[in-house]
Image: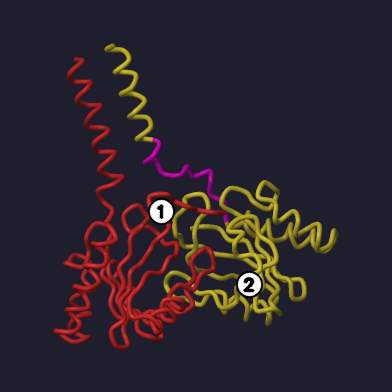
Chain colours: A red, B yellow
Amino acid sequence: MRKFTIAMLVVVFLVGSVHAAGMRGTAPEAIKMVEKAVALIVSEGGDKAFKEISNSKGPFVDRDLYVFVVDLKGVVRAHSGDPSMVGKNMLDTRDMDGKAFVRDLIRQARVKDTGWIDYKWPHPITGQIESQSRYYHKIGDFIVTCGIYYLQADFET
Amino acid sequence: MKKILLGLLIVAFIATGLAYAQQPKQLKGSKDEAVEMVKKAVAMYKKEGRDKTFAAINDPKGEFQYMDLYIWVIDVDANGLCLARPVFRQLIGQELCPFADSEGKPFMQEACETARKKGMGWVDYYWANPVTKRNESKSTYFECVKNICFFCGYYK
């Protein structure tokens, strides 16, 4: 009985920790995914690459990592996490801090081709709103992004 | 030892269960309660004036925050300048009329136009629920006294 109990405890804690840490991508992985998408756009051209990226079961989804591409008008051109977002204009979309992060992203990318932006957004697996840092790479008129989420909810009300 | 382990096991299961349990239903405000809260804020504003009403709305433990319902106030003549709210208080002082939601819907543009024309109405959009901490579909009622508009929405 004791062995069984210990085994159960180990299982419970393992499941808990995998759930907490294993579903989260890291900053180097986010950068790698963006560069993979950029390379695809360069080799295949925008239209074909956008179609390949906008596949929620394809290579541009890995745990909580997903890629979206916006043009300089704020229109989503590709989205691997939620392909239904393609075609939507996010220029005035705000997070709950009132941050127009796509507007900020475009402004920043015009000045510097690669970098990071921060805002709050629902985690794609848990659905909970969290702090997010998104790496971006501007290529021509398109900005390719992939973000990482933070464990602390940092939810100020 | 066996008892301690069993105890730990039970605690671990209860903790896991609680962590994954959905928000209880009674934490959700209804459509009628949202409308009622707006009416209450408007009545107080007319009777007690701006300072007292805004102070009450800004109080996170006050009467204008109830479960996932809360009042927020904008000046529609100042591009939707947010004047008071008990939650997401970072928005106070920001101009809300240009706001779009997570789907790109310019919901506040629509609300501000209706507010200017009719002085009251409804608007649907996605916004963070302060109780569940999720981005949820929301329907919001608003009513204006001249340029000052009071909003309260329920999460669907």
- The residues tagged by marks 1 and 2 sit, at their Cα atoms, a distance apart of 30 Å
Left or right, B45 with reference to A80: right
Left or right, A155 with reference to A47: right
Residue picked out by circle 2:
B121
Q: Residues within 10 Å of mark 2 (few under 14, many from 20)?
A: some
Hey, what amino acid is under mark 1?
A: Gln
Secondary structure beneath disc 1? loop
Would you say the residues marked 1 and 2 are in contact, meaning their CB atoms lie under 8 Å apart?
A: no
Q: Residues within 10 Å of mark 1 (few under 14, many from 20)?
A: some
Which residue is painted at 27% across and 33% down in the image?
A13
Q: Position of residue A71 (x, y in %)?
A: 35, 84
Which residue is painted at 23% across and 62% down in the image?
A29
What segment is highlighted magenta in the picture? B18-30
Using the image, determine if residue B9 lies above or below residue A80. above
Which residue is painted at 44% across and 55% down in the image?
B134
Q: Position of residue A99 (x, y in %)?
A: 51, 70
Which residue is painted at 25% across and 70% down in the image?
A80
Left or right, A44 with reference to B90: left
In front here: B21 or A78?
Answer: A78
Secondary structure beneath disc 2? strand
Question: Which quadrant does the N terminus of chain A fall into?
Answer: top left
Magenta region includes residue B22:
yes
Q: Nearer the viewer, mark 1 or mark 2?
A: 1
Q: Position of residue A86 (x, y in %)?
A: 31, 77
Hey, what amino acid is under mark 2?
A: Gly
In front here: B148 or A97?
Answer: A97
